Image (tube, rainbow, N blue to C red):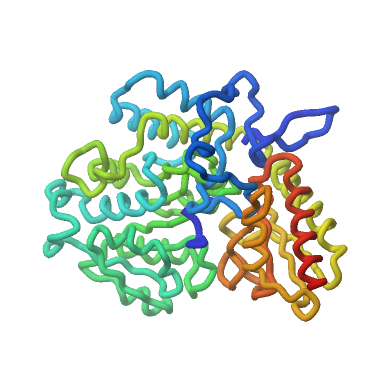
Amino acid sequence: MAHPISRRKFFSKTGGTLVAGSAALGSAARAEAQPTQSGEDYYAKLGVTPFINAAGAFTFLSGSTLPPVVQAAMTRAAQRPVNIEELQRAAGEYLARRLHCEAALVTSGAAAALTLGTAACITRGNEQAILNIPGDLSELKNEVIVQKTHRYGYDHALRNCGIKFVEIETMAEYEAAFNERTVLAHFFNAAEGGQIGREDWVRVAHQHGVPCFNDAAADIPPAANLWNYTQMGFDLVAFSGGKGIRGPQCTGLLLGKKELIEFAVKNDSPISNTIGRGMKVGKEEIVGLVAAVDCLLSQDEAALQAEAQRRAERIAELVKSVPSVETRVFLPPVANHIAHLLITYDQNRIPITGPEIMEKLRQGSPRIELNPVTGAGPYMAGMPSGPNTVVVCVWLLEPHQDVIVGRRLREVLRAAGKA
């Protein structure tokens, strides 16, 4: 889960120089684990056309691609049955050790992590309540405090549990909002707006004995965010598994306090008659996410960022030859914190809009998807935005696709300028 429109050992040594691998930037460089291409091409059979991903790890664009080491782990896991509860428990213990937190749970996406974490806060210490949510909350705490600027397109993941949001703006309003019905203080990590920062959010909530939940779904890289927020004091933190972690698209991570994770498990599949019964993850996905975390933590993050910078600069060089085109490489402040390319131009000289450029690349051959974020918001904080704006995400490109994207952008911009 990322912003609504809205997250690799990716390198091998060649001639003594570190270069990007295929899937972001590419794939884990573990040749011994790479599966062979086999099986029927069902994209072709179903008439679905893949694309070059210059957009980013968005859910509606199927997230990120799996490094070969993750694909291999999932293929192996698919070949033998296991007890899901045993696997979940073992995976959670392993991930908690690797990510420096008390406990962890693999979920069916970050949205499921939000639902299960909220359910855990409502039902902790009261297993009978698991049967009652979201309907009968008359005897349960169900108010969630949130900054007004942190309301977003994933509210429903919390509201599934029957909670009521209490919106605040100032510190005085925040301190006054706590009462005997308060169950949770919720924070959207990528929302840079709001008067109350992370540390103060946690401090005040804990003064009232209320847990804090941080939605950091798309906030990898850097990998250190996987423990930064639990160590800051957040009781629960949610991440998407299929974005910057580069695990299966249908996975997420719920990290945090042991007691709360235990109650998240009690509200989760495969246990029947729980709010999470339909939020199942299979053995392949659980193993895939564990493998993706291992892969992520083994990579050279500085090299990852440097390669993204180079890719953005290569595309910039290709499009800057078009009159009035200007480029800037930028890093989104929180979510998807890796080099992106911002392209702007004079619409009097190039009479085409950013969305029209996106559509032309989408309809071309090869098909290319550009980043859909062209308006203001936390993702574009401090950057120009508007109808003459195009954003290119480079970190999910395969080798040499940056040149293809740059040439196609130049071609479309030139054609529009001559029209």
Residue at 27%, 59% in the rendered image: 160
Examine the rendering and report whether any part of residue 50 can be seen. Answer: yes
In the picture, measured across the screen, residue 355 lies left or right of residue 188, that is right
**In this picture, residue 80 sits left or right of residue 133:** right
Percent x, y of residue 410: 79, 60
In this orientation, does residue 235 appear? Answer: no
Numbered disc total: 0
In the image, taking residue 305 as reference, residue 271 lies left or right, namely left
* Location of residue 25 by image quarter: top right
Residue 288 in percent (x, y) is at 47, 32
Quadrant occupied by the C terminus: bottom right
Q: Residue at x 52, y 47 (%)?
A: 63
**Which residue is more in the foreground, 118 or 208?**
118
Name the one closer to the observer, 107 or 61. 61
**Residue 81: quadrant of the picture:** top left
Where is residue 153 drawn, in percent x and y? 41, 65
The one nearer the camera, 42 or 320, is: 42
Residue shown at 41% from the left, 75% from the top: 148
In the rendered image, residue 104, in percent from the top left (x then y), is placed at 39, 40
The residue that appears at 42% across and 23% down in the rendered structure is 77
Q: Is residue 23 left or right of residue 95?
A: right
Relative depth, front residue between 248 and 123: 248
